Amino acid sequence: RELRAASSPPAQNATQQRLPGAIIIGVRKGGTRALLEMLNLHPDVEVAKAEVHYFNIEEHYQQGLAWYRAQMPFTLPGQLTVEKTPGYFASPQVPERVWEINPAVRLLLIVRDPAERLVSDYTQVLHNRMTRHKPYQPLEELLISQGHINPSYKALQRSLYHQHLAHWLDVFPREQIHVVDGESLIRDPFPELRRAESFLDLPPRIAPSNFYFNTTKGFYCLLSASGHDKCLDESKGRPHAPLRSQAFRKLCRYFREPNRLFFEMVGRSFSWC
Ligand code: A3P
């Protein structure tokens, strides 16, 4: 960490770029950035700052492993490299590809109420379109057609966690996937980080004092050991696009059965709507 913080590039003989030992695979809008930044508080962890999209974007995948490795941070031997790409979770070709390069990789999946996730997903796309001055339909128009939930809406499909997880469980044993509760991470990050450290076989180094609640942001922010203070940027935790409560309830009903199937697969339940 000292080496990376210095302005000159790290000495090549001391550090090198290594393939990740752990990957945050999703879910999109689940709190993946928060989880990555929080894991990065650990002295034995170095993270790829930008989303890598190696296994899910064909042009990247075709560049091969040397390209993938070049996206990674420099680490000392014994440090764990972590990357996060939320697009991996819902891409069915990815699990096999990940297995091929490292069948022992540890996978982290941060989940969130799928109805809230969908609204957050829509809000992000809307925001991106608005910044490019492009029009976008209201959420309800995309979500509901002739009084029924529209099953072909992409953001809805991304919230069908059981379908995506099934592809991962075809390839990886359940124990290799650690599920993080995104709502708990928001309410009280430390216990989730302690569980993640244990899953990653890291000595417990992240402490409650690494987090403080920022009332302006309305979320926990991070304090590193060197006293560096960091909140996530304004794209994390922004107000959601409006959705009438009647439509939201319809959405909750729609997710009831998919959620039950997901709970069965992971062997735990969540208090989602
Ligand atoms: P919202 O913007 O819908 O509130 P991702 O990083 O996967 O895109 O997830 C974004 C979500 O992370 C945000 O969704 C926010 O709720 C959640 N989050 C979790 N912990 C956070 C934190 N400490 N600061 C800001 N956002 C956090």
Image (spheres, rainbow, N blue to C red):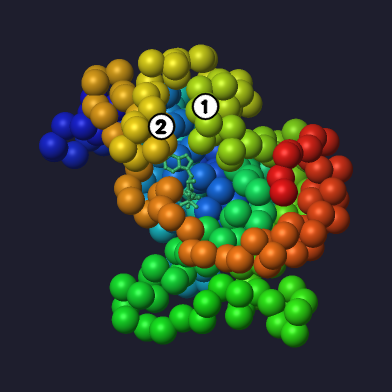
Q: Position of residue 91 (x, y in %)?
A: 64, 63
Q: Is 263 displayed left or right of 25 in the figure?
A: right
Label disc, if present, on residue 188 of the rendered structure: 1
Taking depth in this image into account, of 114 and 52 the one nearest to the observer is: 114
Q: Residue at x 67, y 37 (%)?
A: 179
Please, which residue is most extreme toward the left here? 7
Q: Are marks 2 and 1 in contact (CB under 8 Å)?
A: yes
> Mark 2 highlights which residue?
220
Q: CA distance from mark 2 to mark 1?
A: 8 Å
* Element on which disc 1 rests: loop
* The CB of the residue at mark 2 lies under 8 Å from ligand 1: yes
* Quarter of the N terminus within the rendering: top left
* The CB of the residue at mark 1 lies under 8 Å from ligand 1: no
Neighbour tally class for label 2: few under 14, some 14-19, many 20 plus, Cα within 10 Å:
many
Taking depth in this image into account, of 240 and 127 the one nearest to the observer is: 240
Residue 86 is at least partly visible in this image: no
Residue 156 is at least partly visible in this image: yes
Q: Residue at x 57, y 22 (%)?
A: 191
Q: Is 185 displayed left or right of 104 in the figure?
A: left
Q: Position of residue 101 (x, y in %)?
A: 60, 49
Q: Residue at x 33, y 51 (%)?
A: 234
